[in-house]
Image (cartoon, rainbow, N blue to C red):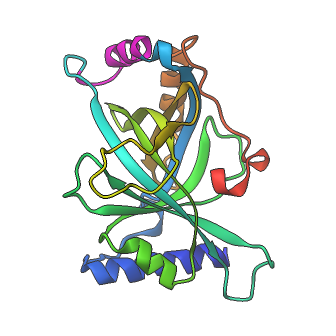
Amino acid sequence: MRICMFLIKIYYRIIARSGTNIKPCQKDYVIDQNFHVLGSVLDTAVSVLLDRLRGLCDNADLLPETFHDHEVVFTLKDFSGTGSSGSGEILRARRAIDHPELPWYLRYVGFPETGNYPAILRKCLDVSVSNNVCEFLKELGAKVDHEFVTKGYILKKGRIKVTVFKMFKITQPQQPGSKEGNNLEPVSVSHLVELSVLTTKTDTAVADDLRTLADHLKPLVHLEKIDYRRVPMNYR
């Protein structure tokens, strides 16, 4: 909890630097909870999955929105002296490669909540920041753990966000003047599929809608809750 509050203070510091006006709001109505389920589909079946999603999601007559992002994952240790010796949290900074005019985004995702929920429930803080956020985090003592590139599609069904994307690892730094993508290597022969929705602490009914949509995608893809206790910290 102390680490989480420490990270929230950092977010407010970043927001203050960006000049964002923060207005007080009631605690129960802060949209900082994220329900999500995950799965994967082979590259050869992506087009079939997208056709199914277009039939289930909003704006079926339009092509899915595309995205191409670069994400840098930082590990931030707890310097308050109250946590364990190896305690720390993960912060994710990302930018849109296909839209360089847009700001960077910084995200903190907490540990999964305990309880019998239809989907994974975690605290999620997401804020737009300036393009020097990586240097700022390093000044705070954060270390770069890894970085990767994602490329895929975004669809919406009401409040639910559906992303179908492929992950690429960066084999070497981008050389000046070289073609974008020459330093990328696919992580697998599959695309990841994620259904997610941002909500409040008291609004959990939307998780049932998310679960219903996930069931409609079977047997093309099985979207399940992930046991994060078995996943290394830097992949959460």
Dominant SS of magenta comes to helix
Q: Position of residue 206 (x, y in %)?
A: 47, 38
Nearer to the camera, 227 or 30: 227
Residue 206 appears in the figure: no
Q: Which stretch is magenta?
A: 47-59
Q: Is 132 located above or below residue 202 in the figure?
A: below
Q: Is 23 located above or below residue 150 in the figure?
A: below
Q: Quadrant of the N terminus?
A: bottom right
Residue 88 appears in the figure: yes
Q: Position of residue 105 (x, y in %)?
A: 36, 61
Going 40% across and 83% down the picture, which residue do you hit?
13
Going 25% across and 18% down the picture, which residue do you hit?
60
Residue 177 appears left or right of 37 = left
Going 30% across and 76% down the picture, which residue do you hit?
22
Q: Position of residue 53 (x, y in %)?
A: 38, 19
Q: Is residue 49 magenta?
A: yes
Going 22% across and 50% down the picture, which residue do you hit?
99
Residue 83 placement: quadrant: bottom right
